[in-house]
Amino acid sequence: MESDWHVVSITLLDELVRNHLGTPTHYFCGGNMFIYYSIEQAEEIEQYVEAETTARKPRFKGPDFFLVKDVDGTKPRDSWVVWNEDGRYPDLVVEFISSSTRQKDVERNVGFYAKVFRVPEYFWFDRRSGELMGYRLSGSDYVPIESNERGWLWSAVLGAYLGVWRGSYRGRVWSWLRLWDSEGQLVLTREEREARERARAEQERAAREQAEARAEQAEARAEQERAERERLQAELSQLLERLRQQGVISDDEPQP
């Protein structure tokens, strides 16, 4: 059975890809979905299900996550049937490794995705070991994708980096596979976007309140200065009047 991390990791990657690429009018991404790539394989699965026997296991192929470019991703699909999709195979596949699938994902799938599906990019991530590997198709074989100084792997299919990020997602604190754009900015989940928008709105509100407070303080200082000028003017006028009455100055002296 799949672990909680396994299931949620697929959900997270699906959300990030959609947030990064936008409305799926030009791509399709699926997780834990069967891919039917030949009539013979489909018949094997059908016979296996109908016979309800484990005598001969068919060629199931259902990547944890895959993406196909330049197709209508809004079209409902229960599975990906290659011959119903103009012969289109995935452009990218990601597998999340568990203890029971490690040998298949690390060894057999590298050859299968390169030689049978001809997938341009294949990635796998093992949370237990922290390993993240990526391969890019060159000729008929895969060559490893070199990581950058941050340990991220560039996906030309996604136009983004894949890397390991530790933090909270849906209440779970684990190591997750995340995306960063070409400028190195983390591709955010909807929850993170909303939290950032709330924080930005709060900062803007606080900045407005500070500006209003400064304006009120400036207005109060201006009022104090005006009142002080008027007070001094009145005192000066009173002083001059007393001096005139005492004959110290004449009535011809100019008024202040």
Image (cartoon, helix red, strand yellow):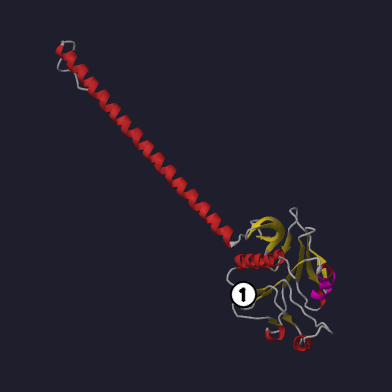
Give the magenta range: 104-113
Q: Quadrant location of residue 183?
A: bottom right
The answer to whether residue 68 is above or below residue 231 is below
Q: Nearer the viewer, residue 14 or 252?
A: 14
Residue type at mark 1 is: His
Percent from the top left, x then y, of residue 113? 79, 74
Give the crowd class for mark 1: few <14, some 14-19, many >=20 residues within 10 Å.
Answer: some
Q: Position of residue 221 (x, y in %)?
A: 35, 33
User: Considering the image in quadrants, where does the C terminus appear?
Assistant: top left
What type of secondary structure mainly makes up the magenta span?
A: helix
Residue 14 falls left or right of residue 38: left
Left-right relation of 79 to 41: left
Of residues 16 and 167, the one drawn nearer to the viewer in this rendering: 167
Q: Quadrant of residue 255?
A: top left
Q: Is residue 109 magenta?
A: yes
Q: Is residue 246 left or right of residue 215?
A: left
Which of the two residues, 32 or 208, is positioned nearer the viewer here? 32
Q: On the image, which quarter does residue 21 sit in?
A: bottom right
Image point (55%, 55%), residue name: 196
Looking at the rendering, in which quadrant would you find the N terminus?
bottom right
Q: Give residue 55's position: percent from left, percent from top.
A: 84, 84
Q: Residue at x 75, y 89 (%)?
A: 50
State yes or no: residue 207 in magenta.
no
Mark 1 sits on what residue? 26
Q: Residue at x 68, y 63 (%)?
A: 160
